[in-house]
Image (cartoon, rainbow, N blue to C red):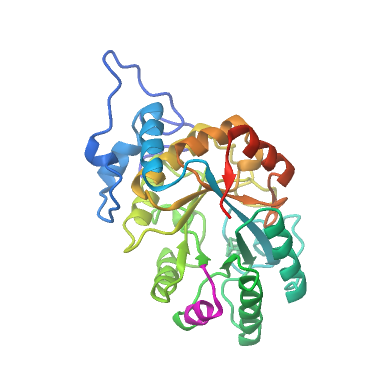
Amino acid sequence: MTSGMTTGSPAAGSVGQAAPAFAGPCPRLAPDLVSGEIRSDWTKAEIARIYFSPLLELVYQSASVHRRYHDPRAIQQCTLLSIKTGGCSENCGYCPQSAHHSTAVKPEGVLDQDSVEASARAAKEAGSDRFCMGAAWREVHDNTQFQNILAMVRRVKALDMEVCVTLGMLSAEQAKQLKAAGLTAYNHNLDTSAGFYDKIVTTRTYQDRLNTLKNVRDAGIAICCGGIIGMGESAEDRIDLLHTLATLPEHPESVPVNALVAVKGTPLEERPPVDVLEMVRMIAAARIVMPAARIRLSAGRAAMSYVEQALCFLAGANSLFTGEKLLTTPNCDSDADRQMFDLLGLQPIT
Ligand code: SF4
């Protein structure tokens, strides 16, 4: 941590804190910072100026940038299915699926292809245009298992859906085979800043993650990559994460913004909940620095009211996960989402 600021006790200029009272007019973000131009040369200082701007000015600007690249009513619905749950050899501090932590998650084997396809069909009927399959692995070692995953990708693709998988680290050759099978996107989150990373995970490095992202990009697969807030990181760590994402050779096609769901039995079980306005700030800053990306309101949404989610959409979120569970943690149910879409005048992307 660079400043000792945490999400639980914001200090001056930190996230989640009311902007200082200004005697004069509200300070505006400089036009060059909110031009909406797609840039990969952002500096940390520029992102910090965006991130720390008064919240309503930030949301006004991010909403304006959002409208230059996206229909503000259109929201992508992705359904996430855990195809192999628990027993993971990695030690990610937030994750109930790690074999290093004692949680209520019971390890389960890999789902069979027919049940995966049936889940994808149901997701499509419920309005999802993307189906994501997640497996709790460090990487896929076994070629038989990898061929099984390729077959799942082909079967979901044949339903005319976008297909995403998250399987841990990926070699260049595996990425090529996934591309050939029809994979749309690969999810591999950076989680947090390079500086804070080893407080959360020690079984693989930040560079390992960047290497996987390179393999995915080189294979021509869209990258889905974001992070988690509320793990004890500072505001500077969040800015560093945004900087890493926004200065990749190409911006991720989708950027999940997660609020930590503190699960009993994980090292982060005592972390206090993330303030919704911190999520709004993170989403708004992500929208401005990665204008064309889909910003996905991800974990933590189940605890938000419609009004709070509306603020996230206004700030630039335009994608969400549907289905009762986000791998192993609770999510919003689809009836509630349908009602929210009706109330807010949102439309699923199909
Ligand atoms: S986040 Fe993924 S890699 Fe980390 S412990 Fe959980 S399942 Fe394993």
Residue 326 shows up from this direction: yes
Q: Which residue lies furthest to the bottom in this view?
A: 144
**Residue 58 image offset from top left, x and y in percent:** 37, 33
Name which residue lies at 41% across and 33% down. 59
**Residue 144 image offset from top left, x and y in percent:** 65, 86
**In the rendered view, does 68 fall on the left or right side of 156?**
left
The chief SS type of the magenta part is helix
Q: Measured along the vertical axis of the image, is residue 284 above or below residue 130?
A: above
Which quarter of the rendered picture does the C terminus lie within?
bottom right
Q: Measured along the vertical axis of the image, is residue 152 above or below residue 315?
A: below
In which quadrant of the rendered view does residue 120 lie? bottom right
Name which residue lies at 38% across and 56% down. 245
In which quadrant of the rendered view does residue 163 lie? bottom right
Looking at the image, which is closer to me, 292 or 112? 292
Residue 322 shown in magenta = no
- Give the magenta range: 174-184
**In the rendered view, does 235 fall on the left or right side of 39?**
right
Looking at the image, which is closer to me, 238 or 297? 297
In which quadrant of the rendered view does residue 340 lie? top right
Name which residue lies at 62% across and 69% down. 89
Residue 1 shows up from this direction: no
**Residue 51 image offset from top left, x and y in percent:** 36, 38
**Residue 203 image offset from top left, x and y in percent:** 52, 67
